[in-house]
Amino acid sequence: MLRELRIKNFAVIDQLALDLSAGLNVLTGETGAGKSIILNALGLLSGGRVSSDIIRQGEDEASVEALFSPLSAALREKIREAGYDDEEELVVRRIISRTGKNRAYLNGSLCPATLLSEIGAHLIHIYGQHEHHALLKPEAHLSLLDSFAGHGEKGEEMKKRREALGHAWERLSATRENLLRSKQEEELLKAQADEIAQAKLRAGEDEELRERKNILLHAEKLYRGCKEGEELLYEGENALAGRLGRYALRLRELANIDGSLSGAVELLESALAQLEEANSSLRRHTDRIQFEPGALEQLEDRLAEINRLRRKYNASVEEILNLKEKTEDELRSLDHQEEELPLLEKAFESTRDSAWQMAETLSNARRQIAKKLKREMEKEVASLGMPRTIFEVRFLDEEGRRDDPPFLVGGKRMTAKGIDQIEFLFSPNPGEAVKPLAKIASGGELSRLMLAIKSLVLTQEEIPTLLFDEVDAGIGGAVAEIVGKKLKKVASAQQVICVTHLPQIAALADLHYGVRKEVEKGRTFTEVNKLSEPERVDEVARMLAGVKVTEKAKRHAEEMVKGSGD
């Protein structure tokens, strides 16, 4: 509930402080005094759009601040989820700057505008002069019917089951599509995997083959060169190893005479060992050199096969091997999807049946409660001066539309709200057929229909504060008094703040504020004052009489104000 409101530098308002109470809070005053500006300021606290044009002339910024208490459990949970401290009270503040750096705060901490809109929806609902035109939109009628029925839990369950059905359908459809696509590609995948497997590729094989090809192309040259080395080292008459060996014996004898030659002996013997190892390496290499007929042709054929695969798949040997593994994985996945599909179909069918069962249950409950809403609405509207009004709740379908399972079956489309589409119809005159509100309802009739619905539908658990901005426009006399009593009835469950020009409504206020516009030194100011009992009588008398307040009007006003407490 809105406890306090502070406004500064907002349009014609310099500074304003209001202390509000439960029940019916009324704002009255001359046309143009600034009553609706106050409600516009409250609209900013519930996330409404803002423009620097509302900043008072000569000021750099405007601010609106409000204290709400107590808070509903749902709202406190939302505040906690957003990362703000959970407190018994909530202070919402919004600052509008000419520089465009507008800011919003929750309990002193900065708050994004999107979060303010979400939280504001739990705090205040504003019914402007044309708000009742929402009744012209059939999509709003189902929510009103469910609110009247108290279908909150059933609605949440319906939403959950519809979401579950959507997820199950998406997963099943995706699996079917993937399976169909994979089936179409299965032969290609198998052929691809078999081709690569038959090629028996090895990582790095192409490099090895190119090296071997180079050796085969130069086999004769390599053979002669290695043989030449063997002859030079060991095989020839003047082989280097033999000559050095003989000299090593001579040098060893000399070292026995002069020990300083021992180092030279060791070096020479080491060299002889390395020469021997080099000769052995040349011999082994000579033995490996092939002169088989057709060896080069076989190697070139293998290289040609590898190059063909590389060109075909535009990939290296390693990438082709990875492709083979990936292809085999896809084939295994295809087998898995075939096994999984019956399980998904079974799970989907269970989810579908559950969702449609809930939708049918909710639809049956709605059809029953629609009969009660008809009776109650006709009774309420009759008390508002339309005694012979016929009100109906018509359930619509999409007959003739081709089924589109699982969400459109037999002319019934399932949404998060169920399978019902409804529209409110009425006839204000006997003998006339009921028609949609948009076709025949006048502004005054819509105002009364809206008040009738709100008096039946709204509960304390919904939105704690309702703001009515001259929704009584176009009515008067005895009907105005009845409308006032309806507002009073709504205010017994929720806080109501109402801007009105009707004395019949003002007289019923639990808290009455008078709004006045003054001009001082060429500047316009709006003042808002809480009215005492005598001041309330004077204000109601002004509303009754107009420019000249007579004693008769004053006595009538006094009777109305005193009678409001009965």
Image (cartoon, rainbow, N blue to C red):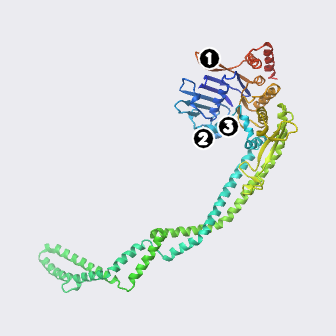
Q: Which amino acid does label 2 sit on?
A: Ala
Q: Which residue is drawn at 54% across and 24% down?
A: 59
Callout in the foreground (3, 1): 1
Callout in the foreground (2, 1): 1
Quarter of the N terminus within the rendering = top right
Q: Which mark, residue 122?
A: 3
Badge 3 vs badge 1, beta-carbon distance below 8 Å: no
Q: Which residue in the structure is indicated by mark 1?
A: 519
User: What whole-number distance in Å separates the C-alpha atoms at marks 2 and 1?
Assistant: 45 Å
Side of 355 relative to 333 (left or right)? right
Residue 73 against residue 333 in the figure, above or below: above
Q: Which mark, residue 82?
A: 2
Front-lying residue, 520 or 74: 520
User: What whole-number distance in Å separates the C-alpha atoms at marks 3 and 1?
Assistant: 38 Å
Q: Residue at x 42, y 81 (%)?
A: 298
Side of 436 relative to 60 (left or right)? right
